[in-house]
Amino acid sequence: AISDAVLRRRAYDHPSSFCAQLNGQTATGRQLGVKGYGLSVGSFASQTNTIEAHVPELAIARAAVLDYFLSPAQRGLEKIFTFEERYELRPGKPLIAMLRSLCREVTLATPNPHLELVDALPCTSNLAKNFPELAAYRD
């Protein structure tokens, strides 16, 4: 939740294309055809429903995370990294659309931009080189 909130803040001097894509914009501020992209917490909510919390701060942190991701501002976003829906390590349509738009903006010519995420060596991926913040958001 913290990395999502930080990545959604637009830098004034040199905005990141990935951070702008999360808000449904290009780095220049032009609105794309989507409201934005976000994460799903469906499995987190069900898996932590009966978790043992030994200190009240853990229950407060869980509630804060769920409140953030289930807020009205996040509800209308296209969900990316939704691997828990089908339990397959296959990208969904919103993730492919975001990566295509991101690669188009930085003129990275690749027919399958989602394959840049599954590089054998993440340090050699063009997306990881150009957008180091993607690793923190993805993982």
Image (cartoon, helix red, strand yellow):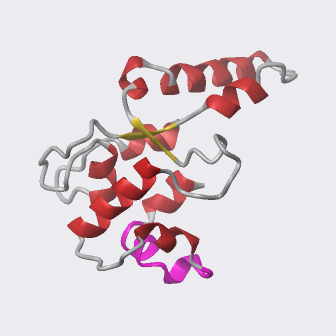
Residue at position x 57%, y 71% in the image: 118
Residue 125, x across and y down, in percent: 48, 78
**Residue 121 is a magenta residue:** yes
Where is residue 4? Give x, y as percent.
46, 41
Query: What residue is shown at x 36% (from left), y 76% (from top)?
Result: 111
Q: Is residue 54 above or below residue 25?
A: above
Q: Is residue 44 left or right of residue 50?
A: left
Q: Is residue 135 above or below residue 83?
A: below
Give the quarter of the figure containing the C terminus.
bottom right
Q: How many marks?
A: 0
Q: Tell whether 100 sits left or right of 139.
A: left
- Pick whichever, 58 or 139, lies toward us: 139
Task: State the image coordinates of residue 132 (x, y, percent, origin top left).
Answer: 44, 66
Residue 74 position (above or below residue 111): above
Q: Which residues are magenta?
A: 120-131
Q: Nearer the viewer, residue 89 or 103?
A: 89
In the image, is residue 127 above or below residue 93? below
The residue drawn where x is 58% and y is 27% is: 65
Q: Is residue 75 magenta?
A: no
Main secondary-structure element of the magenta-colored stretch: helix
86 and 137: which is toward the camera: 86
Q: Residue at x 26, y 43 (%)?
A: 24
- The picture quadrant where one finds residue 18 is bottom left
Instruction: State the image quarter where residue 102 is shown.
Output: bottom left
Q: Is residue 102 left or right of residue 53?
A: left
